[in-house]
């Protein structure tokens, strides 16, 4: 089996179509199909199930695909690292992150990068949850990731900063006039919950914090993205704890908590950072 065949498989899975994958790879559909069939013969069974609308991985394909993807991504990263070591001022830098950091931490950094390194194009990979970010980084989806600190990570991890969480409420909410709030003050309030909430030892951080304050949070609505959650809180659907940078442009109040709650933002990668990746992390710091 060849790296090219693995690259073809990854493209078909990502595009969910032989036709679209062939277009992305700039090959004919017949050539693509021939290589996939050759790969399936070599591994000893079908990797893809051809359906009326699209394709999907077979059980054998699901077992094989993460390893093929890692091989393809690692080859891409190796090429970019070699170019960076040679002093290249062109090419691409792939960055993985969760949605909250994509809209909060990265825009200013990307603007500065474009001004200082106009020849290096940034490619952003956004994921819905921390766990998905970690899993895809293990499979080599990007050169560097920006997100919460991963546990038991084998590669380098750099702490970029700590961000303080604030309570989000409408401006006419009685809590908006307070100098600070405690979690006990919120025992009777409904909450806006988000899929991106931090997890500690298998439990959601907010559940642990509220339990220590003597109550269980009552959920009004649960969202997939932080940007949705902050808008729900600003509209008065429920209270929310989030980073202040996520409130830019919203008409709402951000109230500090006592004690203050903070979370780390880190940059991490599978291998030692070099070239453009190292410079981008330094810029973030």
Image (cartoon, rainbow, N blue to C red):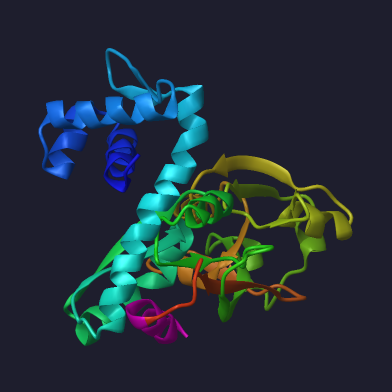
Q: Is residue 266 above or below residue 16?
A: below
Residue 276, given in percent of the width and then of the height, sits at 33, 79
Please name whichever residue, 166 or 32, is drawn nearer the observer in this view of the structure. 32
- Residue 222 in the figure: left or right of residue 140: right
Secondary structure of the magenta portion, mostly?
helix
Please name whichever residue, 222 or 97, is drawn nearer the observer in this view of the structure. 97
Q: Quadrant of residue 7?
A: top left
Q: Is residue 256 above or below residue 14?
A: below
Q: Is residue 92 above or below residue 71?
A: below
Give the residue furthest to the top. 52
Q: Is residue 222 visible?
A: yes
> Residue at left 60%, top 60%?
173
Please tell me whether residue 46 belongs to the stretch shown in magenta: no
Where does the N terminus fall, quadrant-wise?
Answer: top left
Residue 68, given in percent of the width and then of the height, sits at 42, 43
- Residue 102 in the figure: left or right of residue 203: left
Residue 181, given in percent of the width and then of the height, sits at 73, 70
Please name whichever residue, 167 or 3, is drawn nearer the observer in this view of the structure. 3
- Residue 153 in the figure: left or right of residue 214: left
Residue range of the region highlighted in magenta in the rendering: 275-285
- Count of marks, rendered view: 0
Q: Is residue 251 visible?
A: no
Q: Quadrant of residue 114?
A: bottom left
> Residue at left 53%, top 59%?
170
Please name whichever residue, 192 or 237, is drawn nearer the observer in this view of the structure. 192
Residue 30, given in percent of the width and then of the height, sits at 13, 26
């Amino acid at each position: 089996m060849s790296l090219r065949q693995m690259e073809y498989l990854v493209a078909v899975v990502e595009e969910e179509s032989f036709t679209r994958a062939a277009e992305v790879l700039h090959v004919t559909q017949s050539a693509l199909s021939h290589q996939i069939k050759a790969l399936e013969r070599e591994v000893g069974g079908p990797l893809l199930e051809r359906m009326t609308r699209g394709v999907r991985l077979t059980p054998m394909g699901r077992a094989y695909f993460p390893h093929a993807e890692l091989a393809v991504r690692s080859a891409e990263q190796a090429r970019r690292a070699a170019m960076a070591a040679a002093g290249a001022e062109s090419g691409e830098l792939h960055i993985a992150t969760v949605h909250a950091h994509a809209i909060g931490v990265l825009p200013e950094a990307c603007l500065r990068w474009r001004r200082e390194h106009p020849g290096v194009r940034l490619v952003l990979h956004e994921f819905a949850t921390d766990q998905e970010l970690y899993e895809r980084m293990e499979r080599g989806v990007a050169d560097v990731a920006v997100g919460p600190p991963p546990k038991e990570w084998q590669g380098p991890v750099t702490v970029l900063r700590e961000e303080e969480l604030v309570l989000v409420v409408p401006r006419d909410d009685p809590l908006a006039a307070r100098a600070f709030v405690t979690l006990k003050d919120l025992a009777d309030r409904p909450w806006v919950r988000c899929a991106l909430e931090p997890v500690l030892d298998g439990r959601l951080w907010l559940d642990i914090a509220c339990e220590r304050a003597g109550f269980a949070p009552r959920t009004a609505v649960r969202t997939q993205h932080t940007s949705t959650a902050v808008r729900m809180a600003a509209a008065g659907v429920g209270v929310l704890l989030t980073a202040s940078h996520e409130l830019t442009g919203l008409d709402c109040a951000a109230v500090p908590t006592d004690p203050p709650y903070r979370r780390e933002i880190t940059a991490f990668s599978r291998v030692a950072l070099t070239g453009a990746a190292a410079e981008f992390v330094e810029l973030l710091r």
